[in-house]
Image (tube, rainbow, N blue to C red):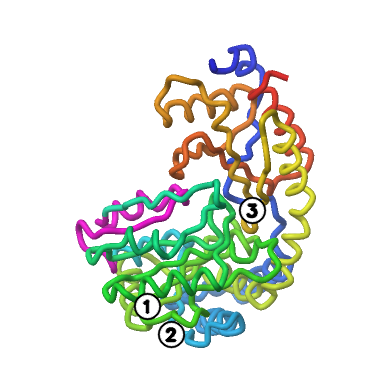
Amino acid sequence: MPDAPAASSATLPLVSLASGYGHFAVPAVALAAATRVLATAGQQAEPLAVAPTAGLPTLRAALAARYRLRGALIVEPENVLVTAGAKTGLFALLSELLAPGDDVLLPTPNWFGFGELVRRAGGVLRALPLAAADNYALPPGALRAALTPATRLLILSNPNNPTGRVFSAEEWAGLLAVTAEFPDLWVLSDEIYEGISFGPVPVPTLLAQPGAGPRHVVVSGFSKSLALAGWGVGCLVAPSALAAAVAARLFATGVAVPVPAQLAALAATEQAEAIGAALCAQLQPTRQLLLAGLAALPGAGTVIAPEGTYYVFADFCRFLAPGLPAADASAALVRRLAAAGVEVVDGASCGAPGFVRLSYAVPEAVLVEALTRLRAGLVGE
């Protein structure tokens, strides 16, 4: 198929379904907490306090308490670090764990940022492709076949960005039984979307599983599940010795998260369940709208509703131009959609050319317009 006509691209401003940040109001409790500390500093004509590199003790304790409530009884405050966004914590962790050339296994599709972070930390990323046809299941046998004694780190995302797939506790049990066979292997679970879930049970954290142990790490943050996009707060939960080493690295290379942002994060942590429930309720109408719009496209077949995140990873392989390499055809498809006025994430960047990541964390009117343009770009209607 050719790219869209030039006339379309000349007249349509882009409507974006590509952003990784939701269109969410800042939680009132978080805003109030930050405002109080700023107002106090102004009233007293004093500088803001500077937090310890590892984070405010109150926030670390609150995060540890929340993990324990989720069943992760091994988590104490000394296991928790507060970082300047999840990406900063992730890179510091990878830099601490990986030696040059270390093998890192990543089931794909997965977040496009992992590749560059692993590369900059000295590791070599190796993909383990999963299939949409079986809803991106990761059988223990497939994991065992992909791991080698040289594999230093396995990265899993739960819920997965971009697919929305959630690993259940039963699936974790099978996977951890395999990783236990590799005593030098670390397991990292990216759980930043854990509060955006539409399944029958809450998203299980790696650290609550019976097989969780001293080589298991979780990275998370506040921008997705707790509506604090732009506040620059992440968190890392790791064995105490590794947490201390990462904190020392952060002390040498950066600064602590500003206190107002940490106090906002503390307030959000204390109200995490209510905030997550409100976000999911806000997302329900646009979630259904996007799923219905995709199901109405020619040749759609069954559209699987993702259990977590605020994305749908749509299979548009049937719209690819024939005769091109998969990545080139996928890029051409994304250009055609942009020419029709809608911006999406190319699935090739996540390991799945021909798929596109679409966010429904946008106002309903924006999504309605985006779906109209999407259909026009794909089928000319």
Taking the image as shown, residue 220 lies to the left or right of residue 183, namely: right
Which residue shows up at 67% across the image and 22% down it? 379
Indicate which disc residue 306 carries.
3
Residue at 79% across / 50% down in the picture? 285
Q: Which residue is mark 1?
A: 243
Eye-nearest disc, 3 or 2: 3
Residue 325: percent from left, percent from top: 40, 26
Q: Is residue 61 above or below residue 38?
A: below
Q: On the picture, is 98 further left or further right than 224?
A: left
Q: What residue is shown with label 2?
A: 78
The amino acid sitting under disc 2 is: Glu
Left or right of 263? Residue 296 is right
Among numbered discs 1 and 2, the one appearing first in the sequence: 2
Measured in 3D between alpha carbons, the distance from the residue under mark 3 to the one under mark 1, in whole angstroms, is 33 Å
* Viewer can see residue 366: no
Q: Mark 3 to mark 2: distance in Å?
A: 34 Å
Q: In terms of secondary structure, where does tag 1 sit?
A: helix
